[in-house]
Amino acid sequence: MKFFIIAAVFAIAAADSYRTAEYAPKYVAPKYESPKYEAASYGEVYYEAQPYDFGYSVKDAEYYTDYDHSERSDGKVTTGSYRVQLPDGRTQIVTYRADSYGYTADVKYEGEAKYPEYVQSKYNTYSAAAYKAPAAPVYSAPAYRAPEYRPPAYKAPAYTTPAY
């Protein structure tokens, strides 16, 4: 009991020393400014041509892929070439130039086209059948009866005389 009385006295002393006005939150109304937008411009955007240089090459024996490409530009004239291994064994080489006068390409072929010689397969030879074909089946024509048409039997409608 004495403990509760001492605790109450300390609680009152601590509450008396608390300064509410000093620690109370102060509310300041927020100030909002309307956003400022630039006027939209819908004109065409033009970027000046930039010089570049690139190249790549692929040679994959497993998939019979062999080609390369290289290109260079100074911003006004674009030159380049590409090389492709064709299925017939030749190599196609294209050298091109693109400028203000248009696109000009020079196409060359290296090597000679080689096609495999045709060999008749022993598996797709078609000879006569080794078995005796069965005789064609004989069917008898079905017997049909001539259709019989009966005129429909109509009865005159029976009306009752109305009563007024």
Image (cartoon, rainbow, N blue to C red):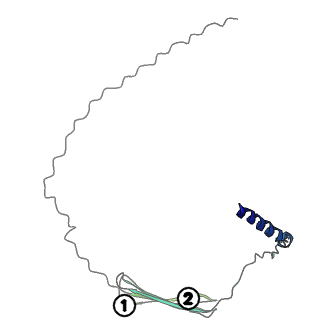
What residue sits 80% from the left and 66% below the top?
Answer: 12
Q: Residue furthest bottom?
A: 74
| Distance of label 1 from label 2 (alpha carbons) | 23 Å
| Mark 1–mark 2 CB contact (< 8 Å) | no
Q: Give 72 or 98, whichever is nearer the viewer.
A: 72
Q: Position of residue 11 (x, y in %)?
A: 77, 66
Q: Which residue is mark 1?
A: 111
Q: Which residue is mark 2?
A: 104
Q: Is residue 82 left or right of residue 9?
A: left
Q: Position of residue 100 (x, y in %)?
A: 64, 89
Few, some or many residues within 10 Å of mark 2 (<14, 14–19, 20+)? few
Q: Position of residue 46 (x, y in %)?
A: 71, 83
- Place residue 117 in its image quadrant: bottom left
Counting labels gives 2
- Mark 2 lies on a secondary structure that is strand
Q: Is residue 91 left or right of residue 76?
A: left
Look at the image and tell me in which quarter the C terminus lies.
Answer: top right
Q: Residue furthest top?
A: 163
What residue sits 20% from the left and 67% below the top?
Answer: 125
Q: Is residue 11 left or right of residue 99?
A: right
Above or below 104: residue 147 = above
* Sequence-first tag of 1 and 2: 2
